[in-house]
Amino acid sequence: MDGAMFYIYLLTNSHKNVLYIGVTNSLERRIWEHKHHHLIPGFTAKYNCQFLVYYEMFDRVIDAIAREKQIKGWNRVKKDALVATMNPSWNDLSAVWFKAPPSS
């Protein structure tokens, strides 16, 4: 697939005490699905993980899956340190993606 991108991403909840790691070929769509967790039940809905705190891009899905597995094998301290490399304040990196434009 020419031009296709794949992503690994880490989500957390408002308390930042849960981390979810996933893979997708459409980061914005997938995060929207997580933010509307009532549509897709599962781990992220149960623990209200909807804040994107980290992501990486890959040209090949096999590389993204390998990285996802690698990170899932890490302890929490190492995962937290990874997030801090991109997002030391643990802000929701997707916060502006879904806001409605201001009324005119």
Image (cartoon, rainbow, N blue to C red):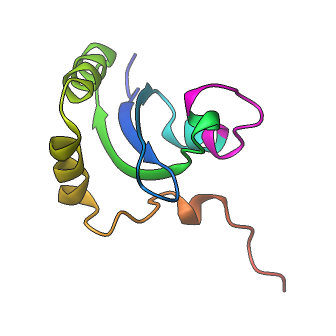
Q: Is residue 26 above or below residue 85?
A: above
Q: How many marks?
A: 0
Q: Considering depth in this image, is 2 or 81 the residue closer to the camera? A: 81
Q: Considering depth in this image, is 36 or 42 the residue closer to the camera? A: 42
Q: Quadrant of the C terminus?
A: bottom right
Q: Position of residue 64 (x, y in %)?
A: 29, 23
**Which residue is situated farthest in the bottom direction here?**
104
What residue is drawn where x is 77% and y is 36%?
Answer: 38
| 47 lies left or right of 10 | right
Q: Position of residue 23 (x, y in %)?
A: 41, 26
What residue is drawn where x is 63% and y is 35%?
Answer: 46
Q: Is residue 60 above or below residue 82?
A: above
Q: Main secondary structure of the magenta part?
A: loop
Give the extent of the magenta segment: 33-43
Q: Position of residue 58 (x, y in %)?
A: 28, 30
| Residue 42 lies within the magenta run | yes
What residue is drawn where x is 73% and y is 73%?
Answer: 101
Figure quadrant of residue 91: bottom left
What residue is drawn where x is 61% and y is 39%?
Answer: 34
**Which residue is situated farthest in the right direction here?**
104
Q: Quadrant of the N terminus?
A: top left
| 56 lies left or right of 73 | right
Figure quadrant of residue 88: bottom left
Q: Position of residue 83 (x, y in %)?
A: 26, 52
